[in-house]
Amino acid sequence: MIDNDVFIVFVALATLCTIIIIGLGFLPRPSREAAIWSGAFVGAMCASYVWLAGNVLGLAPLRSAGIGIVLTASMCMWVGLRARRAAERTYLAPILLLGVALTALIVISAETSWAEIGFRAALLVAAAVAAATTSELFRMGPLHRDEILPLALASLAFIIVTAAGVVDGALRLARGESLEIDGGVLALRALGVLGGAVYFVAALVTLLLLVREERAGTHHALRFDFSAIARDRLARAEVANDLWWSVLEIRLDDPIAIREATSTAAYNRVVARFASDVLSMLPAEADIDQKSASRYVVLLPRPDASVRPLLSRLLARVATPTEGQGIETRLSASIGWAPVGLLSFSLDTLLAAAADAADTAQREGGDRWERADDLAFLDNAPTGNITDARPA
């Protein structure tokens, strides 16, 4: 039997992690992924008490139930990561059903000769989900390399330890040895309990950083329903036949290259400087939606003749070095410009056109603006005298 002190460590850490993720993560930044991750930590905390009770009372099925719940909680990390990137399917229900099945398998086989086989099979399934978790973390790219590191390393360690356990079991069976629990297996399980505690602490660090990330931007004024407001303004503009509206997509050039070449602190100063440039150069009546630290979408009420010099001034401002910009490299931006007068009053059309124009600006080397002038975007383009425009 594993020493109770090992389980007490897990109970204490699981409880503390649950309080932190809910108090500092979900409550101040409520979201679907935060709710899933918080639920996973609550499950791990409850499982730790069940696990400890089973060890104190010497009840193998109770200990096994705790193991199954902990494995299910760890698999929910993957579900939350899929929810964070707005995947079409998060597979929450299948993962919970899989967790119930694994828990039932471990509990039913707890006092039989199949106990070790059931336990290692459950670990193997959980390790496969841990591999999927690692894949989801790496999909976030280098912009989140510091945030994902703790959970990625813990997941990889879990996969390695599980693989070692499965190989050990296979070798024992190949040699005709029994999988009965002995001193070596108990030592490995005690190490697994401590490893589980470390895993959830690593998960706490990564997930808390992701939950608390300012996805709507560091400027509090940017936290609003941009889509609803923009659609309302454009609908009223269409009624008034007001063509003096545009959608802009403003992107910092090469953010991934900047992130890979700098430290976290330096990159944060770069994007903070970029945010300051965008916010200070745009007029007060512009509606701004920060899609990421390096990408903004703007609804701008200005005639074409006023937009051109505004974009040129913004590009010049971004490219002007300052002492606090974080790196020595000259910064630049790419801007896509979609005027209502050329396209339509449809926000979706304008957003798509501005994004395509920004793509073109970046392909042309950046540090420029491009106006969307492809009428293939349109079913119905507003009529008017539209003059051609080229990047400044």
Image (cartoon, rainbow, N blue to C red):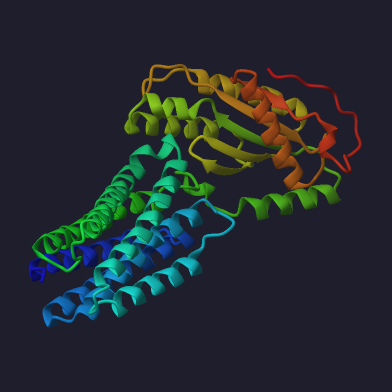
- In the displayed structure, would residue 268 be above or below residue 86? above
Relative to residue 265, is residue 183 drawn left or right?
Answer: left
Q: Residue at x 25, y 77 (%)?
A: 110
Q: Is residue 31 visible?
A: no
Q: Give the farthest residue toward the front.
A: 176
Q: Where does the image place residue 348, in percent across and percent down from the top left?
A: 73, 46
- In the displayed structure, would residue 135 be above or below residue 165? above
Relative to residue 19, is residue 144 drawn left or right?
Answer: right
Q: Residue at x 38, y 23 (%)?
A: 261
Q: Nearer the viewer, residue 117 or 37?
A: 117
Q: Quadrant of the N terminus?
A: bottom left
Q: Is residue 78 visible?
A: yes
- In the displayed structure, would residue 389 be above or below residue 52? above
Q: Where does the image place residue 375, in percent across and percent down from the top left?
A: 85, 33
Q: Where does the image place residue 217, in percent across and percent down from the top left?
A: 48, 44
Q: Nearer the viewer, residue 55 or 337?
A: 55
Q: Nearer the viewer, residue 81 or 196?
A: 196
Q: Nearer the viewer, residue 385 or 365?
A: 365
Relative to residue 6, is residue 70 drawn left or right?
Answer: right
Q: Where does the image place residue 91, in percent across and percent down from the top left?
A: 51, 63
Q: Residue at x 33, y 39 (%)?
A: 146
* Label total for image: 0
Residue 392 location, quadrant: top right
